[in-house]
Image (tube, rainbow, N blue to C red):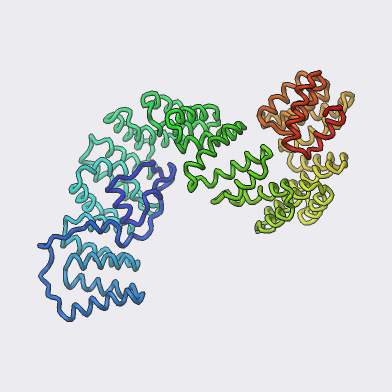
Amino acid sequence: MTHSPVIRPTRLLLALLLAFGLSACASMGSAPAPGATASEPAADAGLDDDVIPDDRLPSQPLTDELLLRFLVGDIALQRDRPQLAAQTWHDLAQKTRDPRVARRATEIAIGSGQLSMARDDAQRWIDAVPESIAARQVMLSLLIRANRLDEAKPHIQALLAAQPQEIAPFFLQMHMLWDKNTDREAALRLTEELTTPYPQLAEARFARAVALANVGRIDDALKELGEANRIKPDWEPAILYRAQLMGKSSTPQARIDYLKSAEGKLPKSMALRSALAREYVEAGQLAGALKVYDEMLALQPNNLEALTGSGLVALQLHDLGTAEKRLSRATELAPQQTGNLRYYLGQIAEERYRFAEARDWYDGVDGEFKPSADKRLVRVLARLGDIDGAQAQLKAIPAPTDEAKVEKLQLEATIWREAGQYRRGYDVLSDGLKRFPGNADLIYDRSLFADLLGNYAEAEAELRRYLALEPDSAIGQNALGYSLANRSTPADTARLAEAQQLLDAAIAKEPDNPTVLDSLGWLRYRQGKLAEARALLEKAYARMPDPEIGTHLGEVLWQQGDKSAAQALFDTAARLDPKSEILRETVQRLGAK
């Protein structure tokens, strides 16, 4: 495992990374991932500023033979024969000892992938103009690429001597030079040799810490960070990297306490606040994370990380209003970087029964979440009444595995459920069970369709069959518990007791799940415990204002005599889901409007 802190590159590091064929952004992933994999060195990166003094140019007459060789090299390039071109220019560099020719030979050798030849040409370039920063940068990149770090030291020393103002920033960012193939032990040796003259430079201690961590010497790395903080008290990079290295050797709460203490000394540090919020999330302390993100947004309302982080945390807390507001703002600020957020915004719109809006969000999803968005789009199109569109969308989804084939069967059944063709959905699942006998997901879904068709005994039997396959499933426990409660009267004590047992098990696993809270509330209603039922249903509805939960709460309020509040809930449910069968049945039975 490698440990690379997130650092923004300065000018010297940027030049080296460009010479190495890297983009600076590609190297700045989330800690503790290693730096980005290096590609071939760029042929012309960082060379345009290389000025060769006239007195370094050899007195070499341009003979006919030399002119012919130059023409051969250029024609070879024009005719897409890079190996011949590289060899020709390599020979010319050797013959002329002209730094301009050596530079050109280096470029062509790199471009043709002949890196050994490129090193030879770059060395001739350096021999001719030792003070050339561009030549040193290219040579250094070639040596790193070849894992010849022991030869890199003089070139780094020369670069630092030419740019002493870059010494501290270079050490802070030195780890960005290594890719996944770098010999980490060699990198540690080089780091120690280069930093030895600077024992009182915090950045040098930081460079040692990173190199030590990357060979697994975490305790030694932490000692170096301690020295860095002794030299520079309350230095943000060392604090953040220490928290990162604490990793699995400490509890999440220990990292939180450490970062909170540091943040108290550096209250304006957005980086520390971000790290603290991420630790809260990692520890499952979502309310703490949201509080930190809110503090960040109070200082920087358009902070993209805080908007995204707080939006996703709010979504987990089922605070859909906050989630939608924050994630929408993030997509407005950075539309090219936030394609995945459209998936979550689609979920929010879908949960709020705004299906046309959900369709538009899912259509705009790109990247890793696109397959999931495409699947959710099937149901959304069906909810919008576009059955042909839903079927076309489903057909376009690949199914290379049995698991994917089962998922497509479930989606097909969903289309017919939204279309009100319950028998057709039931038959799809039944056919699926012939192809995949004993598949728990298909059994669960078929139980729901059996219930919709009024086959309550079959629905219950299928749920029991599902739980026999998945005995710890909170979803199954909730479904069977609700079914038993919904089909029982207060006199059915045995069935209500079983429902209680199932729902207690489900709520123990998912204490904040609004669907389980709804089931428990409905069980209390069936038991005649109206006050308890109301409290549970109000909690569920606050977390998820779903029409079915609202209908259940409305019925409890109606029975308590608060008919105006109940009617308001029925009206809201009707606006959200005019086709709700539970709402229609409840309103008719109660004589409500």
x, y percent for residue 538: 71, 24
Instruction: Tell me if residue 97 comes above or below residue 39 in the rendering.
Output: below
x, y percent for residue 170: 27, 44
Work out whether residue 407 or residue 549 is closer to the camera in this orientation and state it: 549
Residue at 40% over, 54% down? 37
Work out whether residue 283 or residue 517 is closer to the camera in this orientation and state it: 517
Q: Is residue 93 rendered to the left or right of residue 250?
A: left
Q: Quadrant of the C terminus?
A: top right
Instruction: Tell me if residue 35 comes above or below residue 218 in the rendering.
Output: below
x, y percent for residue 171: 28, 42
Q: Is residue 24 rendered to the left or right of residue 485?
A: left
Kindly give the residue lying farthest to the right in the view shown: 491
Total marks placed: 0
Work out whether residue 593 or residue 416 is closer to the camera in this orientation and state it: 593
x, y percent for residue 328: 54, 39
Residue at 78% over, 38% down? 580
Q: Is residue 23 visible?
A: yes
Instruction: Tell me if residue 444 comes above or below residue 320 in the rendering.
Output: below
Q: Is residue 254 visible?
A: no
Residue 544, located in which quarter of the rendered image? top right
